[in-house]
Each structure stands twice: as C-alpha cells, then as structure tokens.
C-alpha cells in the first residue's frame, strides 16, 4: 500500500492517513453518501548506485505515486457510523484496486474493519517522524534501492489481504490522533489472499490469489496465513510535549510449497512471530513550530522449518528527528533526518538450494535528509538526499552476493485532496 502524504501533523505516522474514514458519532441519521479523495506525488529522482553483480540501472527518472479514494459513509438512527472505502491505483500496478473494506464504528465502543486493508500493526505504529515523502520507516519506498514496503513494518504482515481489524474506542477514534489515552487493536487474516484468479475454473497455489474455491489454498509457496496481530498505543500531553507510545505483536503461518512439504522439513514451513516497540515525542515550542523525535525496535522471525538449520530472523531499529516551523499551515517549512539499521541472520540462499549455508548476516543501513515546504493546503513541495547500503554475503563456495550501495536525490510535489 502506498501512503506518502499527510506528513505535517505534530505526531506523524502512517495511521494518520485514514482521517477520511473517521468521524465523531452523530445523533442525527445521515444517508449513505460517497466522496472522492486521494493523493498525487510527482517527482524527479537521481541515483549513483554500485552493485557487485551485472545489473544496469539508469541514473535518473521521472516517477509518480497516486491513488484515488472512494469513501462511503452514513449514520444510523442510533449514532452508529457505517461505511466503506475503495482505493484505486492511479497507475498500472499488480493490484489495480489497492484496498477495499467496510467499517462500522461507535464513539463509545470502537471500530471494526472488514475486507482488504492494512493490519493494525501498520495503522497504529509510531516510530521516527517521516521527513521525506516517498520513503522512510513508515511509508513506501519510491526512489530508494531498498525494498518497497515501509522498513519498520513486519515483513510477514499480510497488509491489504482479506481480514478483520477491531479497535477499542478509548476516548478517540483510530486515525484522528486528537484524543488521549490507550487504544487497542486486533487483526485476524485466515489466508494471505487479496485478489481472485483471472481464470475462475482453475485452482491456484499462487501466493496472494484466492483461488476458484474462494477459500484459498493452504500450500501457496511462501504465503503467510492464519495471522493474529495485536497493537496498542497510548497518547498523552505533558505540558508542551505530546507523547505517543506503541507496541505491536504479529504471528503468522508460512505455508509450505506443496502438500508433501507440509509434513516434512522444508523452507517456508512453520509459524513465525515478531514484536516491536516505538515512540514519537513532539515538543511544541509555542510559536507554532515543533520538534519531533522518535524511533523504535523490531525483532521478527522471517522463516522457519521443522529443523533449526533453515531458521532466519530480523532485528532492526530506527531513529529520526524533524523540525516544523508551523505545522500544516501554508508556508510551513520542515527539515528532518532519519536513520534505519537492519540485520537478517542465516539467509536461506544456500541451504534452501541444498548447498552450503550463507556466510553471514544480511545488513542494511539507510539514512536520509528531507526538506518540505507547505505551498498551500493540500500542496506540499519536497526534496531530499539519502543513502542505502545493503551488505548481503554470497553462499560459501559460490561467490554470489548482492551487495549494493545507492546514493539518491529527489525533488517533487505532492497533492492531497
């Protein structure tokens, strides 16, 4: 899911991108109505990249990231808000419909989301404040050489898959970030399935496809299923400081390649889990400006077999600092830095292929400097420079590796509507 906007809030996080869904409970009934919103980022990017294998890439490119959101909302006689959301990619991607889900919410109880959307660990997190639209620990990568998913998300997260999210109310709605107190969130995803097959007469074992039975297959190669996730965050103000604390837990089953490997030792089989902690602290200076400091730590099993030889885990941490002159008001200027470090142990390349084990950990260091300027309401100009350094040893005896180091720069304009 590509969420790269609405970055000028005091406590910035991926969760803040869902304001369109959220409204206070009403005593007056309202019929279902639809509105259109979305975002559009257009940017020019350059890079200087070294890689130890023969892969050629251009030094520059124009790119865009955009979605159109169809929001549905109504209020029942008892004040219950009911609605839905469909997110349409504004370019040709693998999944043209990004998210689609229904929701029901009450101010005194909480909120339920049913359908294809991010899980609670992706919506409720607080880590380093994002200072560069288009990349960071809580937004998707659009111009770095690092993976496209937000760096501090769980790798086995089942975002956008068909499932259910449940949130407690606790004096505030999810996404508004206006209230205080503790909020809990829970997710369940039976299968890592998002889209139906193009040919409904054919059964599928393709990861991400629901299959002709609409129940999905239990032997999709490497797909994660039977997911249970929980998250909690706590917001409070202490004088001039706004504090946000976050904790998350994720547990999934990695499906075997075939039915035969489901009962034998094989790469990709087994239940894996992970946990993470994060915080964002914002000091409000008093003249409209603010300084946000945040970070976090995550530990996750990436894959596991019956034996210990194929296990693989990840440890990562991040820290970031951002200064804003006047929040989201026109003319506000932002400057920030963000750093991320990740280490994946015992990668499966050699062992999974029957060869020798990997020679060492796979490490990734990422850091950037970002500048933003709020041109007008919903119009954000941005620029930044960053470095992504991936150290991935090859297999013993093979000499294969995929180390890469990229220095990038970007300048762009973002619209939210």
Image (cartoon, rainbow, N blue to C red):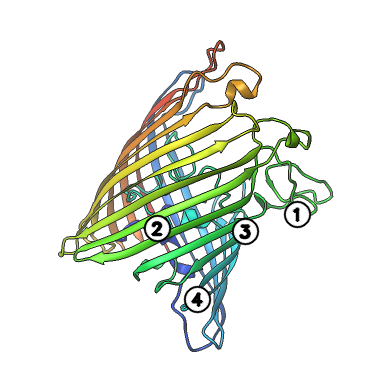
Q: Badge 1: few (under 14), some or many (20 or more) residues near its Cα, within 10 Å?
A: few
| Residue named by callout 2 | 415
Q: Secondary structure at mark 4?
A: loop
Q: Residue at the spot x=29%, y=62% of the render?
A: 328
Residue extending farthest top: 397
Q: Nearer the viewer, residue 190 or 210?
A: 190
Q: Residues within 10 Å of mark 4 (few under 14, many from 20)?
A: some
Disc 3 crowd, CA 10 A, few/some/many (<14, 14-19, 20+)? many
Q: Nearer the viewer, mark 3 or mark 2?
A: 3
Mark found first going from the N terminus, 3 or 4:
4
Q: Earlier in the sequence, mark 4 or mark 1?
A: 4
**Residue drawn at point x = 62 percent, y = 50 percent:** 95
Query: Which numbered disc, 2 or 4, marks the residue closer to the eye?
Result: 4
Q: What residue is shown at x 72% (from left), y 51% (from top)?
A: 210
**Secondary structure beneath disc 2?**
strand
On the image, the x and y values in percent for residue 16 come to 40, 61
| Dot 2 crowding, Cα within 10 Å, few <14, some 14–19, many 20+ | some
Determine the secondary structure under disc 1: loop
Separation (CA) of disc 3 from disc 2 = 30 Å
* Pointer 4 residue: 109
Tags 3 and 4 touching, CB below 8 Å: no
Q: CA distance from mark 2 to mark 4?
A: 34 Å
Residue 383 visible in image: yes
């Amino acid at each position: 899911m590509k969420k790269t906007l609405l970055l000028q809030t005091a406590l910035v996080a991926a969760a803040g991108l869902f304001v369109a869904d959220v409204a206070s409970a009403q005593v007056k009934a309202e019929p279902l109505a639809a509105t259109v919103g979305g975002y559009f980022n257009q940017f020019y990017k350059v890079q200087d990249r070294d890689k130890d294998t023969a892969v050629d890439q251009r030094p520059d490119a124009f790119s865009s990231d955009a979605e159109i959101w169809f929001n549905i909302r109504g209020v029942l006689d008892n004040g219950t808000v009911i609605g839905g959301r469909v997110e349409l990619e504004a370019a040709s991607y693998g999944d043209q419909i990004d998210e689609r889900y229904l929701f029901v919410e009450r101010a005194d109880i909480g909120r339920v989301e049913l359908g294809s959307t991010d899980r609670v660990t992706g919506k409720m997190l607080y880590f380093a404040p994002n200072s560069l639209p288009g990349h960071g620990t809580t937004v998707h990568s659009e111009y770095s050489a690092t993976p496209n998913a937000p760096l501090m998300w769980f790798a086995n997260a089942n975002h956008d898959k068909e499932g259910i999210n449940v949130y407690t109310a606790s004096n505030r709605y999810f996404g508004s970030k206006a209230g205080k107190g503790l909020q809990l969130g829970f997710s369940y995803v039976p299968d890592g399935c998002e889209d139906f097959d193009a040919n409904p007469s054919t059964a599928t074992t393709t990861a991400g496809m629901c299959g002709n039975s609409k129940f999905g297959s239990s032997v999709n190669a490497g797909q994660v299923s039977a997911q249970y996730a929980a998250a909690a965050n706590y917001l409070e103000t202490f004088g001039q400081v706004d504090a946000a604390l976050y904790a998350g837990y994720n547990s999934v089953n990695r499906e075997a390649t075939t039915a035969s490997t489901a009962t034998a030792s094989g790469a990709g089989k087994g239940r894996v889990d992970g946990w993470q902690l994060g915080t964002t602290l914002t000091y409000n200076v008093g003249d409209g400006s603010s300084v946000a400091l945040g970070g976090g730590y995550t530990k996750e099993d990436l894959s596991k077999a019956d034996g210990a030889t194929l296990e693989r885990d990840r440890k990562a941490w991040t820290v970031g600092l951002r200064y804003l002159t006047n929040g989201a008001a026109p003319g506000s200027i932002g400057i920030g830095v963000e750093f991320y470090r990740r280490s994946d142990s015992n990668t499966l390349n050699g062992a999974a292929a029957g060869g020798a084990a990997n020679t060492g950990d796979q490490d990734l260091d990422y850091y950037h400097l970002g500048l933003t300027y709020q041109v007008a309401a919903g119009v954000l100009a941005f620029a930044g420079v960053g470095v992504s350094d991936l150290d991935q040893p090859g297999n013993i005896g093979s000499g294969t590796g995929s180390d890469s180091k990229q220095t990038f720069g970007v300048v762009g304009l973002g619209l939210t509507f």
